[in-house]
Image (tube, coloured by chain):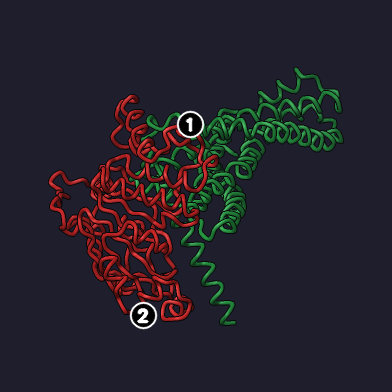
């Protein structure tokens, strides 16, 4: 029993310490935003890497998400003769939930883990120490450009994923349920409000921010050689996935709350 | 256990005091003062009251068994580690009482050659050496090119500017690391095992470079090493680190003539004795 309590204490202490370090790193990265102009070449390079590197995965994920969504809802709606409403369901689901979450999961797997591995390798090979000895701030030089780049890439990719997902739904609507593109896209336009778009993009921003901070934080905290780099990478993916879901729930709750205050429903 | 210092952000100039004076120009003055330095990692004490002065213009070699805290000492001198007790002064300025700006100013005076050279793998040789200039002084591109070429020639690597670090041999990496360490014309160069893992011929080249830089740049050098042939080739003075303290400081001649068993066993590499027992603890 004492062993279990001691173990739980250690886990709790470790979690608090990780969260503390990540929050400090997040605050320091925000403070470093003044260097954006100076680091623009690196930001563009990192944003290109994140966007271009994620394109095949995100395009396929988006297309199939839209198609699966359309086929599953179409089958149910058809029972009530309402298959024409597929456009409603796919457009709303993609923009509010599926688009930002799918993009964030792809970026966490591809870029979050890559940040942890890169910075972790730099840490164990003393490159981070070398930067500090040269009075080059690793947060301004390495972390901030990655954070800004991932947030920008995430917003751009989410918009693209939303569009591809909706198009995927249209293809299934037409081929499986005989719904014309005209009807599908008119329904999609009817359901989408400006709020759906900005909430989706707010989610994309928050998810990317958390993934970039977690990846960089784990990378900078790496120790014990190659095995340590592996552990940091693994921890980044797990933590990022959990954070994406937790943040998604919190943002939904927040949006419902302000919607209720404004007299709207979610 | 706090193996690594917290990485905190701060602009290089933050907290810089214009009146700060780091001048200590008289040869023979202590430029680095290590005072009663204590450092433990978890329950394991590494430094237990290390005290040592490094004099301006000399080459001091710190020797000692593995795990006696030689590299840890170097990391304290540049503020990468914070001691549990004690301090380090550079030209009389306590580096642990310094703000970001002052620490940055102190680090400007120090070049550090890491054991594995610690070159940034994403940058080629030229960009690695130019990095401190681009980040701090930001001179015109022509001036950067001139300075980098000059330093590359100083380490006999004039034709390696466009190579990536993974195209270099161990000895070449160390020479590039050295060129990067001296690009801002430091007053102090710290060497962490400069000849570790190199064959005897390349080791001699690196030793000659240390002597060459000493002669041309008039720097103060602190060299941490196991390599006794290097020590006797380059050292003005030697410090033997034993059980986290300085056991003896003296000239190479003093060390050769000493009948202290700890010194003799280390110099001649005898496997039995207090140093071996210390390493096994």
Please, is residue A50 above or below residue B10 in the view? above
Direction from residue B101 to residue B113 in the image, left or right:
right
Report the chain holding disc 1: B
Q: Alpha-carbon neighbours of circle 2 within 10 Å: few (<14), some, or many (≥20)? A: few
Mark 1 lies on a secondary structure that is loop
Tell me residue B247's x, y (percent). Answer: 30, 75
Please, is residue B4 above or below residue A248 in the view? below
Direction from residue A71 to residue A188 in the image, left or right:
left
Say which of marks 2 and 1 sits in front: 2
| Point 29% across, 40% down: residue | B184
Chain shown green: that is A
Q: Quadrant location of residue B255?
A: bottom left
**Spatial distance from mark 2 to mark 1, Cα to Cα?**
50 Å
Closer to the camera, B272 or B64?
B272
Closer to the camera, A76 or A227?
A227
Closer to the camera, B240 or A217?
B240
Q: Would you name the residue on which mark 2 appears? A: B261
Q: Alpha-carbon neighbours of circle 1 within 10 Å: few (<14), some, or many (≥20)? A: few
| Point 46% across, 57% down: residue | B196
Report the chain holding disc 2: B
Q: Earlier in the sequence, mark 2 or mark 1?
A: 1
Q: How many marks do you count on the picture? A: 2
| Point 69% across, 25% down: residue | A188
Chain shown red: that is B
Q: Is residue A195 visible?
A: no
């Amino acid at each position: 029993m004492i062993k279990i309590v001691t173990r739980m204490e250690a886990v709790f202490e470790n979690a608090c310490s990780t969260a503390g370090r990540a929050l400090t790193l997040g605050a320091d990265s925000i403070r470093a935003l003044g260097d954006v102009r100076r680091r623009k070449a690196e930001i563009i390079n990192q944003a290109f890497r994140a966007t271009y590197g994620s394109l095949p995965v995100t395009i396929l994920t988006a297309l199939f998400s839209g198609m699966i969504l359309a086929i599953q809802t179409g089958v149910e709606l058809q029972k009530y003769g309402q298959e024409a409403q597929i456009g409603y369901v796919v457009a709303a689901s993609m923009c509010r939930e599926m688009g930002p979450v799918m993009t964030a999961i792809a970026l966490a797997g591809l870029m979050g883990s890559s940040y942890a591995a890169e910075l972790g390798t730099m840490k164990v090979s003393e490159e981070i120490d070398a930067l500090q000895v040269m009075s080059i701030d690793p947060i301004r030089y390495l972390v901030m450009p990655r954070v800004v780049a991932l947030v920008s890439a995430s917003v751009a990719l989410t918009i693209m994923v939303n569009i591809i997902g909706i198009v995927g739904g249209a293809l299934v609507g037409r081929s499986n349920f005989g719904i014309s593109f005209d009807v599908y896209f008119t329904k999609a336009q009817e359901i989408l409000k400006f709020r759906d778009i900005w909430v989706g993009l707010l989610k994309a921003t928050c998810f990317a921010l958390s993934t970039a901070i977690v990846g960089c934080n784990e990378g900078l905290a790496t120790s014990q050689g190659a095995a340590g780099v592996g552990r940091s990478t693994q921890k980044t993916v797990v933590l990022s996935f959990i954070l994406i879901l937790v943040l998604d729930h919190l943002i939904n709750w927040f949006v419902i709350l302000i919607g209720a205050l404004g007299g709207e429903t979610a | 256990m706090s193996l690594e210092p917290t990485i905190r952000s701060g602009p290089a100039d933050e907290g810089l005091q214009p009146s700060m004076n780091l001048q200590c120009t008289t040869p023979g003055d202590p430029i680095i003062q290590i005072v009663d330095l204590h450092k433990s990692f978890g329950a394991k004490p590494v430094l237990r009251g290390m005290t040592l002065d490094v004099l301006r213009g000399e080459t001091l070699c710190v020797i000692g068994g593995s795990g006696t805290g030689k590299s840890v000492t170097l990391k304290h001198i540049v503020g990468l580690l914070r001691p549990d007790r004690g301090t380090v002064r550079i030209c009389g300025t306590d580096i642990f009482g310094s703000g970001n700006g002052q620490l940055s100013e102190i680090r400007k005076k120090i070049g550090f050659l890491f054991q594995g050279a610690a070159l940034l793998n994403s940058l080629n040789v030229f960009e690695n050496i130019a990095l401190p200039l681009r980040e701090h002084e930001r001179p015109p591109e022509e001036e950067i090119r001139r300075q980098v070429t000059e330093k590359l020639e100083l380490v006999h690597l004039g034709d390696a500017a466009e190579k990536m670090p993974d195209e270099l041999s161990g000895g070449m990496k160390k020479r590039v690391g050295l060129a990067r360490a001296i690009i801002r014309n430091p007053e102090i160069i710290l060497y962490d095992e400069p000849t570790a893992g190199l064959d005897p011929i390349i080791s001699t080249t690196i030793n000659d470079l240390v002597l060459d830089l000493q002669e041309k740049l008039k720097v103060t050098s602190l060299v941490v090493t196991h390599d006794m042939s290097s020590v006797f080739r380059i050292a003005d003075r030697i410090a033997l680190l034993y059980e986290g303290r300085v056991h003896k400081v003296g000239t190479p001649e003093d060390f050769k003539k000493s009948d202290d068993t700890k010194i003799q066993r280390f110099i001649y590499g005898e496997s039995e004795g207090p140093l071996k027992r210390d390493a096994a603890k």
